[in-house]
Amino acid sequence: MKKLFLLLLAAISSPLWAETPFPETPSVKGKVNVSDFLNVRLGPGLRHPVTGRLKPEQEVEILRIAENWLEIKAPETLKIYVSEARIDAEGKLTGELNMRSRMDSTAPSYGLLGAGSIVKRLPERRNGWVRIVPPANLKVYVAAICVTFDRSKFNEKGLPQGAVKSEDIKVETQAIPAPEAKAGEAKSEVPAPAVPAPEAKVEAKAVPGKTGNAEVKSLPAEVKPAAAITLTGVVVKWKFAKTPETSLAFLDSPDGKNQAFVTGTNPELQEQLTQSADSGKLITVKGNYIDGKVPPVFSVVSINVNKQTDK
C-alpha cells in the first residue's frame, strides 16, 4: 500500500517540463502593433504578473485566443533565469528548478523544470543565476488588441485551424503559482529590479474585425463588424492621459480590465461621461471604435446608466 501511495504521489507531482519532448503545437504568426512596448503576463488578465515586454513589430506565435487575450509561445527574447547549482556541464538538471522572471528567488515563477530536463545556457549570469533559452512548450499571454493577426486562421474554439479538438487540450487559465524557493536555488545578493508595468498602457478588449490599428484583411464571410457596438462597465479618470480623448478609461468593473478609452461624440455626452467617472456606476454605452487609435478609443453615441452599481 505504501509503495502504491508513493507511485500515485509521484504521478500527481510530476514536473511541468520533463525530458520527454512535446509534440509540435499548431500556431499562427502575429505581429505587435503598439508604438512603444507590450506587456507579457503569466496569465490572461491584468491581475497576472508582468514578466517581460515585447517590442513594436515583434513577431509572436499565437497558440490560442482566450477572449481578450492571446496565449503565445514564449519568445526567445523573454528573460528566464534559473539557479546554476543543479545544472551539469551538458545542461542537464540534476534536480527540479523554478524558472524565475529575474535573478531573485522571490520573483514570479513560470513553473518548474523537472529533473533530467535539458536547458541551454545564455551568457547572462550573476550570483549563481543564469539565463536560459525559454522551453519550447512554455506559454505566456499578451493583450489581443495589441497584436495584428489573421482571425480566419482560428476555429470557433479559438484554436488554430487544424489543431486537435479543444477537449483534448488541457487549457491553463490561471498563472502557475510561484512555489517556495528550493534548497539549490540561489538568492541574489543584489536582486535585479522587477520589470515595471507600463503606466499608461491600456490592454483592451479585442474588437471583431479589428486588431489594434490594423484591419484584418481575411475575415471569414460570416464575421462582420456590427453597426453599433455596446459596452457595459464603469468610467474612471486616467491619470496618465496624454491627450483629451484618453482622459477617461472604460473598465468592465471598478478594479477590472480596461476595455478602451471613451469619448463623447458631442459635449453633452462628454459631460455625462465625466460626471460618471470614478462614481462606480455601471453604465452601458453604444458607439464604435475610432479607426487607427492605439490604444483603442471608443466614440460614444448614447449612454444608459444602469440601476445597479458595481460594488
Image (cartoon, rainbow, N blue to C red):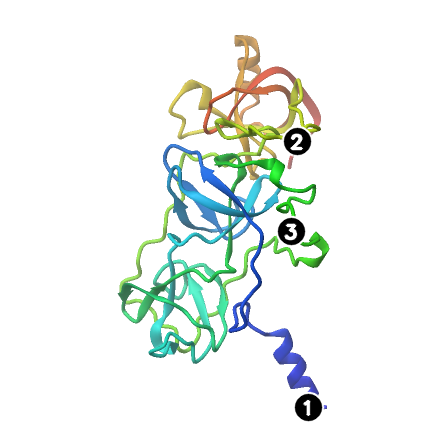
> In the rendered view of the protein, which quadrant contains the N terminus?
bottom right
Q: Callout 1: 10 Å neighbours few (<14), some, many (20+)? A: few
* Left or right: where 60 falls relative to 160: left
Dot placed on the residue nearer the N-terminal end, 3 or 1: 1
Packing grade of label 2 (10 A; few <14, some 14-19, many >=20) is few
Does residue 257 appear to the left or right of 31 in the view shown? right
Q: CA distance from mark 3 to mark 1?
A: 41 Å
Q: Residue 255 location in percent, x, y?
A: 56, 39
Question: Which element is circle 2 on?
Answer: loop
Residue located beneath label 1 in the image:
2
Q: Amino acid at mark 2?
A: Pro
Mark seen at residue 163: 3
Residue in front for this viewpoint, 253 or 209: 209
Question: Looking at the image, is 139 positioned above or below residue 21?
Answer: above
Q: Which comes sooner in the sequence, label 3 or label 2? A: 3
Foreground mark, 3 or 1, reads 3
Q: Earlier in the sequence, mark 1 or mark 2?
A: 1
The residue nearer to you, when weighing 129 against 199, is 129
What residue is shown at x 38% (from left), y 39% (from top)? 37
- Which amino acid does the dot numbered 1 rest on? Lys
- Nearer to the camera, 14 or 184: 14
Q: What kind of residue is marked 3?
A: Ala
Q: Secondary structure at mark 1?
A: helix
Q: Which mark is residue 61?
A: none
Residue at disc 3, secondary structure: loop
Rendered view: 22 above or below 93: above
Looking at the image, which residue is at 54% across and 15% down? Answer: 264
Instruction: Tell me whether the residue at label 3 lies in contact with that at label 2, contact meaning CB atoms closer than 8 angstroms.
Output: no
